[in-house]
Amino acid sequence: ITGHVSIYKWNVIVTIIATCAPSLPIQIAIVVLRAKVLSKISQNSRKMSVKTMRVHRTLAKVLSLQAILSALFVIGIVDYFACQWNLVECTPVLEHMKMQAASFIPLFSPAITFHYMQPYQMYV
């Protein structure tokens, strides 16, 4: 078992900030960029064939779902701070969920692609 006695030492605080701080701005950037991409697609939709438009919509859906997956990382961050600030009783299950929540991202991301992208579909 490893860990730190206090999270209030400078080296621990720097590591926590470097790990947790980028997640919220990245989520905001994902939402903003998604809106811009969808706007650009809709602006150019009159120039596209029906098939091309369908492929673009499917791709936008896949990218949106994969972007939502990164929110699972936020679950681990909230769990971490809830335990550190004694907002909840930190049980072994909560300790395990810190990393388990983020580990679903590489599991579901290819599954989303396989499900929605036509070359990977079994039954078209």
Image (cartoon, rainbow, N blue to C red):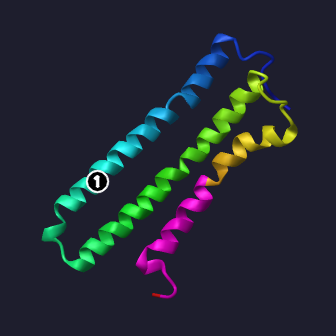
Q: Is residue 106 above or below residue 82?
A: below
Q: Residue 81, percent across and down? A: 69, 27
**Displayed quadrant of residue 57:** bottom left
The quadrant holding residue 6 is top right
* Residue occupying the point 72% across, 40% down: 98
Residue 3: within the magenta?
no
Circle 1: residue type: Val
Tell me the quarter of the image containing the N terminus.
top right
Going by the image, does 110 lie left or right of 29?
Answer: right
State the SS at label 1: helix
Nearest to the observer: residue 121 or residue 49: 49
- Whether 114 is among the magenta residues is yes
Which quadrant of the figure has residue 71? top right
Write down the residue under mark 1.
37
Residue 17 at x, y percent in the picture: 57, 23
Range of magenta residues:
105-123
Q: Quadrant of the C terminus?
A: bottom left
What's the magenta bit mostly, secondary-structure-wise? helix
At x 68% / y 47%, what residue is drawn?
Answer: 101
What residue appears at the point 42 percent right and 80 percent down from the top-left corner?
119
User: Can you give x and y, in whole percent of width and height, for residue 21 in the image?
Assistant: 53, 27
Q: Is residue 61 left or right of residue 94?
A: left
